[in-house]
Amino acid sequence: MNSIQTVQTFLDHVFSGRMPEALALVADDATFIPSRPQPSSKVPLYGTYRGPEGATQVFKTFAAVLKPEQFEVEAAFGEGEHAALHGKLKHYSVATGKPFVSDWALICRVSQGKIALYHFFEDTAALEAALSA
């Protein structure tokens, strides 16, 4: 698989609930950044996470905070180790029921067939508004 295929396969596994298969595509020293690298008491998804354990934490927190409804990949491109994808998403806050709608982009680096960097970008103001009471 090339880098784009690796990332798309990872996302397919995540959104179909096949986490063991998804985590098999994560390097032991991977860096996962869901939106902002600095942790926040307001948004538990923010922070920098490491390795398969960190990826597990990101997606467990995601499931606790957001109910996914739509995750659309509009385009994917890359070269060598690098992959970039972008699209649109719509999720709902578990706590407030408010919708979270955003364009998104994902920048990844894949090394030896495993994700070494996963940095997700989205409308953080819209995310924070959806999560706040």
Image (tube, helix red, strand yellow):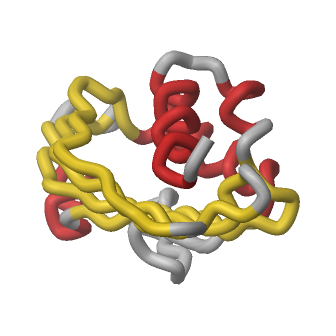
Can residue 60 be spotted in the picture?
A: yes
Query: Which corner quadrant of the image does residue 88 belong to?
Result: top left
Q: How many marks?
A: 0
Residue 61, given in percent of the width and then of the height, sits at 56, 44
Asked if residue 117 lies left or right of residue 84, the reply is right
Q: Which residue is drawn at 34% across and 28% down?
A: 67
Q: Which of 13 and 89 is in front in this view?
A: 13
Q: Which of 14 and 77 is in front in this view?
A: 77
Query: Which corner quadrant of the image does residue 96 belong to?
Result: top left
Please, is residue 7 above or below residue 60 in the view?
A: below
Q: Residue at x 52, y 79 (%)?
A: 37
Residue 26, given in percent of the width and then of the height, sits at 74, 50
Residue 10, given in percent of the width and then of the height, sits at 57, 37
Can residue 33 be spotted in the picture?
A: no
Q: Nearer the viewer, residue 14 or 69?
A: 14
Q: Which residue is drawn at 51% across and 64% down?
A: 108
Q: Which of 12 and 102 is in front in this view?
A: 12
Q: In the image as oriented, which residue stretches furthest toward the right?
A: 28
Please, is residue 88 above or below residue 116 in the view?
A: above
Asked if residue 39 lies left or right of residue 129, the reply is right
Q: Residue at x 72, y 42 (%)?
A: 25
Residue 48, given in percent of the width and then of the height, sits at 62, 73
Query: Which corner quadrant of the image does residue 24 belong to?
Result: top right
**In which quadrant will I find the N terminus?**
top right
